[in-house]
């Protein structure tokens, strides 16, 4: 997979995945022309998500021959038209684009089968580093009541961590971890994972965009 090149393409991604994509750039895997980010946590505000996604796709579409979009199929719900999906929004822009095939950012780091194995029968609230780093955006307008209704119904919170975020935060800002765990009302368990699944999803989109469309003649 190391011989892949994303040159000529741009990435449009939820800002939640900024750390993961920066790591892939630093490792030399991701050589896309540019990466455009939307504000983390816009699944809470679908209209803002659509607006920012369209704007960033417009920037990337003007710079590159194709776009890879890092949003899950469960990240956007149009309350006025439930048949209008994130893929509909992407297709409406008219660019050569591929959305990676995952449900959300959790699914981009570990498949359902992998998560089942990690959970080992426990009820888990799944986290990625960006959900802690950008808490104010991801959990916009969540008060203590909503947190108490949501998190304690799980046995634990598991942080899928492919970038060493938990260990670094524990050393540099342990109070941030303690405050987040206290707010959730459950413990946070870090589980190191690789970026292999995200790489595979990106590679699949790359192949889709680079494969010529067969003529109908």
Image (cartoon, helix red, strand yellow):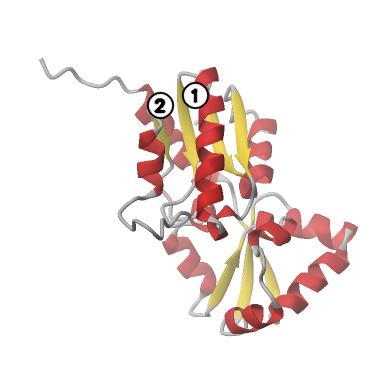
Secondary structure under tag 2 reads loop
2 or 1: tag closer to the N-terminus = 1
Percent x, y for residue 36?
Answer: 61, 33
Assess whether mark 1 and mark 2 are in contact (beta carbons under 8 angstroms). Answer: yes
Quarter of the image containing the C terminus? top left
> Which is more toward the observer, 65 or 126?
65
Q: Can you give x and y, in whole percent of width and height, for residue 191 in the image? A: 64, 63
Q: Nearer the viewer, residue 81 or 131?
A: 81
> Left or right of 33: which side holds 204?
left
What residue would you read off at disc 2?
95
The residue lying furthest to the front in this view is 80
Q: Quadrant of residue 87?
A: top left
Task: Name above or below for residue 23 compared with residue 76.
Answer: above
178 or 120, which lies in front? Answer: 178
Distance (Cα) linking label 2 and label 1 = 6 Å
Q: Against 215, is 76 above or below?
A: below
Q: Please give the name of the residue rendered at 81% of the width and 72% of the height, measured from the top-left corner.
A: 179
* x and y percentages locating residue 118 in the rendered image: 53, 68
Residue 3 at least partly seen: no
Answer few, some or many: residues within 10 Å of disc 1's Cα (few below 14, many 20 plus, some between 14 and 19): many
Where does label 1 land, which residue?
61
Tell me if mark 2 has few (under 14), some (14-19) or many (20+) residues whose alpha carbon lies within 10 angstroms of its own. Answer: some
Q: Residue at x 51, y 51 (%)?
A: 47
Label 1, secondary structure: give it: helix
- The correct choice, above or below, for 182 with respect to 163 in the image is below
Side of 58 relative to 211 (left or right): right
């Amino acid at each position: 997979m190391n011989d892949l090149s994303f040159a000529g393409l741009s990435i449009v991604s939820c800002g939640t995945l900024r750390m993961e994509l920066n790591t892939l750039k630093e490792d030399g895997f991701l050589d896309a022309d540019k990466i455009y980010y939307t504000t983390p946590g816009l699944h809470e505000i679908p209209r803002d998500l659509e607006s920012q996604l369209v704007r960033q796709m417009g920037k990337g579409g003007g710079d590159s021959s194709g776009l890879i979009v890092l949003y899950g199929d469960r990240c956007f719900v149009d309350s006025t038209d439930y048949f209008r999906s994130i893929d509909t929004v992407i297709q409406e822009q008219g660019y050569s684009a591929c959305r990676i095939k995952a449900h959300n950012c959790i699914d981009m780091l570990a498949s359902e089968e992998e998560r089942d194995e990690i959970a080992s029968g426990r009820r888990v609230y799944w986290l990625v580093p960006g959900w802690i780093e950008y808490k104010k955006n991801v959990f916009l307008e969540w008060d203590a009541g909503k947190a108490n209704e949501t998190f304690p119904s799980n046995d634990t919170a598991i942080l899928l961590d492919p970038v060493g975020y938990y260990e670094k935060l524990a050393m540099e800002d342990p109070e941030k971890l303690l405050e987040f765990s206290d707010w959730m009302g459950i413990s946070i368990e870090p589980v190191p994972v690789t970026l292999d699944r995200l790489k595979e999803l990106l590679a699949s989109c790359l192949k889709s965009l680079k494969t010529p469309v067969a003529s109908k003649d």
